[in-house]
Image (tube, rainbow, N blue to C red):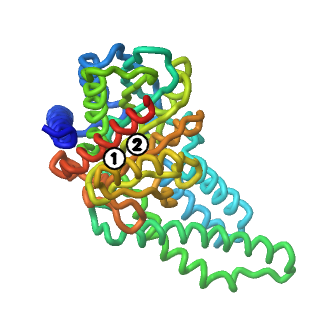
Amino acid sequence: MGKVKMEKLQATKMTNQALKLVKEIVGRYKGRLSGSKECLDAAEDLAVEFEKVTDKVVREKFTLSEQAFLAWIKILVVIYPIALLLSFFSLPITALILLLAGLFIMVGQFFLYKEVIDRFFPKVDALNVFGIIEPKKEVLNTVVFSGHHDSARVFNFFVDKPHLYIFKVGGALASYGALTLLTLVQIFVKLFNQNYSIKPFLPFQIILTVAIYLMAKLWFFASDEATPGAGDNLIASAMAVEVARYFKNREKPLEHTRLIVASFDGEEAGLRGARHFYKNNKELFEGSLYNFNVDCPYFAKDLFFLTSDINGSVKLSQQMATQCVDIAKGMGYEAFSQPIAFLTGGTDAAEAAKVGFEAVSLMAMPWDNKSRANVYHTPNDLPEAIEVEAVKRALSIAIRFIEQVDE
């Protein structure tokens, strides 16, 4: 039997095992918000799987503020009508201070994924799990293959009339920005015009009053319900088990590469689990450092590698992405690299890049503000939504990349 055929059979077996594990965990724990018992139990299940295929397993407990990450949305919703009322009463300076405070929170909490307001929200227990396979000889490289096991809150805007998503979100944020601009104009007119009157501003204020409807809709952007999170992103954690199994059972062990297979908690809460991992395990990171992160591997035809992260604020590795694209094309797979689209969030690879790793995120779904997988952040994110071929390709590329690093 030829080498290529053998590799394809092995990739098929690994894919089937990964999907089987996803189905089992989703069957036990429907939704896995960070801090929930379901999420902690799922992490423990993954740790047990890692114990079978790695040299050492670490259960890394930490705390996070799960509710804080998306709280900026409701903060803006509350600020908007108050600031508008202040504008009507010719108190634009107070209105502007409120509006700018909201913008500061939004930029820090979502655009940059900083922990701006986390301290004001209750802490919950979270759990990262990771396994380590040591090389035969001196460690010259460290590769972290990562996914995350927590699932997202259902985004109601992706469930109810998803084609209006941009209008709903964009319209609300544009209204907020317009009110901020209006208060600025009011301030300047009030400072430099002794005959200041509210009348010229009334038409704009009336329009912005109508826009309260759009702002109010934002209050219901995210549900209290968690998605099943099969493709986003339990499948990547199950793939980590298979990557470890492959290298643990391989006749020729890794010679100079420490392989860490990790499943992070708190990705959907602002990458908090990956942030904790990369800050607290520096003793494991030796030699050349690489993070092969996988997120949302749904559709084989849409496979690509991110070259930037967290709304474009963090640079990932173009060199590593190009290498991975070349590996994919060498296997006959279509792949490409691209920067992340603004307002589409971030992935765990960003936290690796921040501490000096060459890092990429493999994704396999349409990824911009106009088109995403129709199951993304919805109750339909079930195992059946994941294409077998997408997982096979992702596994094959990851394994070949790790082999090339070791060579």
Q: Quadrant of residue 201?
A: bottom right
Task: Using a 10 Å C-alpha cutoff, classify the residue at mark 2 as few (fewer than 14 neighbours), some (14 to 19) or many (20 or more).
Answer: many
Q: Which percent across, then down, holds residue 54?
A: 31, 18
Q: Is residue 180 left or right of residue 256?
A: right
For marks 2 and 1, give the one nearer the viewer: 2
Regarding mark 1 in the picture, which secondary structure is present there?
strand
Mark 1 Cα within 10 Å, few/some/many (few <14, many 20+)?
A: many
Q: Quadrant of the N terminus?
A: top left
- Percent position (x, y) of residue 269? 44, 40
Amino acid found under the numbered disc labelled 2: Glu
Q: Is residue 156 visible?
A: no
Residue at mark 2 to residue at mark 1: CA–CA distance? 8 Å
- Residue toward you, 207 or 356: 356
Q: Is residue 120 above or below residue 312?
A: above
Contact flag, marks 2 and 1 (Cβ < 8 Å): yes
Above or below 259: residue 147? below
Residue drawn at the location 55% of the way across and 30% of the way down = 288
Nearer to us in this view, 275 or 84: 275
Q: Amino acid at mark 1?
A: Arg
Q: Secondary structure at mark 2?
A: helix
Give the residue at mark 1.
153
Residue 268 - label: 2
Q: Measured from the top left, where is residue 174 in percent x and y?
A: 54, 71
Residue 375 position by quadrant: bottom left
